[in-house]
Amino acid sequence: MDEETESNIKEKINPDTDKKNNLDVNERTNPSISWFEPPQRRLNWVDLVAVLGGIVGIYLILALGTIWLMKRWPNEQVLLYLNAFLTQLSFALLIWFLKTVRRWQWPDFGWRTVSLRRALPKILGIYGVTWIVNISYALFLYQHGMSPPATDVYTKLLGQSSGLTLLLNLLLAGVLAPVIEETLFRGLIFGSLRAYCGKWTATVISAAIFSGLHFQAYGFLPRFILGIALVYLFDKYKSLYPSVALHSLNNIVATLLASKLAG
């Protein structure tokens, strides 16, 4: 049997050959499209509940610890920054613990290579929509005589105008929070919930958890919308890089604006 006849027989036996070849062509012409969806590892229900309980526990322990220290060492600014950085460190340790115990690799959390250049127009477009939501919501609150309380932690941190505090805020809000929180809330929590209750329900639940765990009642709605936008990017590109980029862009702009207003 010659090679050409053998090749024709193989193609008839495998009817998916043409489909795969067409998909390979699409992948070459549009690298953001892959002919397969990367396998998504997930936590079981027990582990997922334990993770959520751990997140709440981290917030509560650090909040109570900060309050206790404030009564003995009344340097509020230092303690608030200590609380913020310890929160991100605790989340990072939680991620590392799960990675070690479950033997996950970083792609299992969603850290997969993607072309940010191709994703950039989508990221900027979604950021524009979230910006419109933020402005509309702020105007609504202003018209009804509402404003962030003076005791709000985010107001106190972002309202600092010195060079050092601006640098700390950019590091905290623009680098650490996007990387760590996207790994936790999108890669881990949304990725696991989607396997059990479907994409749309998982989107709403994970966005509500993301917003609610910031413990900021007046900012719940815009942060909930942001959470949905971040899930959309993660699900569209099957990668955390676009959602991290949007999260970072949102936080950096907010930090710079708050610093400008405070100055």
Image: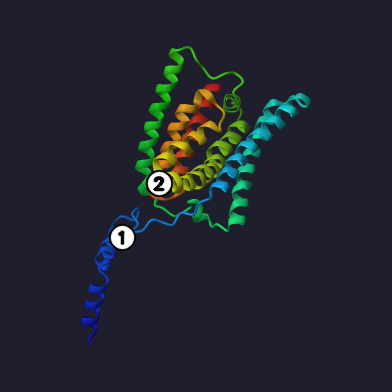
- What residue is drawn where x is 51% and y is 35%? 209
Instruction: Please tell me in which quadrant of the rendered image residue 10 appears.
Output: bottom left
Upstream in sequence: badge 1 or badge 2: 1
Q: Is residue 236 visible?
A: yes
Viewer-closest of 67 and 45: 45
Residue 260, x across and y down, in percent = 52, 25
Report the side of 171 relative to 123 (left or right).
right
Quarter containing the N terminus: bottom left
Quarter containing the C terminus: top right
- Residue lying at the far right in this picture: please name it: 72
- Residue lying at the far bottom in this picture: please name it: 1
Residue 111, x across and y down, in percent = 48, 52
Q: Which residue bears the numbered disc 1?
A: 28
Q: Is residue 263 visible?
A: no
- What residue is drawn where x is 62% and y is 31%? 165
Viewer-closest of 25 and 204: 204
Report the side of 89 relative to 257 (left or right).
right
Residue 108, x across and y down, in percent = 50, 55
Amino acid under disc 2: Asp
Residue 235: assigned label: 2
Amino acid under disc 1: Arg
Q: Please, what secondary structure does the residue beneath circle 1 have?
A: helix
